[in-house]
Image (spheres, rainbow, N blue to C red):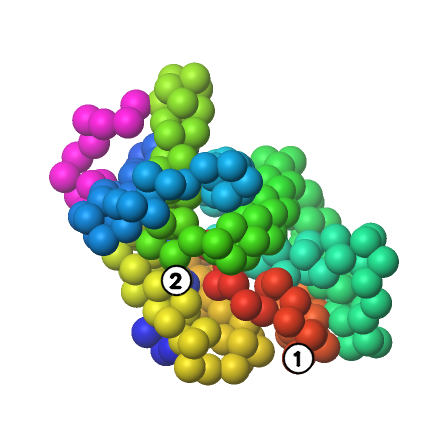
Amino acid sequence: MAVAVVAVSLSGPLMAAAAVPALAIAFWRNAFATVALAPTALTRRREELATLRGRGLVLVVVSGVTLALHFATWVTSLTLTSVASATALVALQFAWIVAWQLTRGERFGAKVVVGLALSFLGVLVVSGVDFTLSPRALLGDVLALVGGAMAAAYTVLGSRARQSMTTTTYTFVCYGTSASVLAVLALLWGHDLGGYPLEQWGLLLLVTVTAQLLGHSVFNHLLATTSPMVVSIALLLEVPGAALIAAGLLGQQPPLAALLGLTVMLAGLVLVVVGNRGRGVEPLVEAPVD
């Protein structure tokens, strides 16, 4: 769990440090992951892939599109606002899912309601501080919020798709779809998908190995052996972890008021997670996207 927390915490700072267009970073991260999965998917899961159609195919493709939109907005936000703000705001995917369930008539305890209120209060504080810094930082906050909402949609769609297919098949098709969408977006925006210096390719590979393989893959494994509530709370440690790494690696030190807002936001998310214990709510059974 400690390795996984450090691995996902490296994601934001490494992508913010890369001198590569945001959409290109998002594309290559998904493309490298697809290539890594290909040998297993195309041999051991060949029959499952050949019979994938209908509702299952639609779910996994739409899930891949939402994943692409998550990466497109969140990675772009890292170029506009601080890593600490962007990482915390995208972590609100927990809150977005519970808020969606509330609109569908589901009822939750007082801890969840208070947690949601605290989470979005923290958003207002952080966004207000960033707006005083620059409209550019506020735009980054908005993109990170959209990225969290897209991650929530990806989580819900993914949990439904995986009821009828293996994880290997799902991730291979989902990441492949996401990479295809991101390639189109990058080309439409005029971003180059190649021609980078060697050290930039190294950063792209490092993001894939750490956040994707040592991060999310390890968390997915832990969900089979560890309480989902413990895993969910551990995932929230990505926020302070990314902030500390960004402070050391990039020299980013958010204002005191912003740190206060981030603390309130995290406290709210912890209440949401704890309040959902035993309910089987989607955000507690799926490792989120960073």
Query: Is 290 on the left-hand or right-hand side of 248?
Result: right
Q: In the rendered structure, which amino acid carries the disc numbered 1? A: Gly
What crowding class fits label 1: few (fewer than 14 Cα within 10 Å), some (14-19), or many (20 or more)? few
Give the mark nearest the N terminus, 1 or 2: 2
The vertical placement of 46 against 229, above or below, is above
State the CA–CA distance, disc 1 to disc 2: 22 Å
Q: Nearer the viewer, residue 39 or 202?
A: 39
Q: Is residue 220 left or right of residue 199?
A: right
- Answer yes or no: is residue 214 visible: yes
Within 10 Å of the Cα at label 2, are there few (<14), some (14-19), or many (20+) other Cα atoms? many
What is the x, y in percent for residue 194?
Answer: 23, 27
In magenta, the rendered stretch is 192-205
Q: Residue at x 26, y 45 (%)?
A: 46
Which of the two discs, 1 and 2, sits closer to the camera?
1
Coordinates of residue 161 in the picture (x, y in percent):
51, 50
Identity of the residue furthest to the left in this view: 198
Magenta stretch contains residue 203: yes
- Amino acid type of the residue that numbered disc 2 sits on in the rendered structure: His
Query: Could you tell me which residue is drawn at 76 percent across and 71 percent down?
Result: 112
Q: Pick the residue in front: 50 or 134.
A: 50
Give the residue number, with chain letter if any, for mark 2. 216
> 40 or 15, which is in the foreground?
40
* Residue located 46% across and 82% down the image: 226
* Residue at (37% x, 71% y) in the render: 221
Which residue is labeled 1 in the image? 278
Residue 141 image offset from top left, x and y in percent: 61, 45
In the rendered view, tell whether residue 103 sits above or below residue 94: above
Q: How many marks?
A: 2
Q: The residue tagged with tag 2: helix, strand or loop?
A: helix
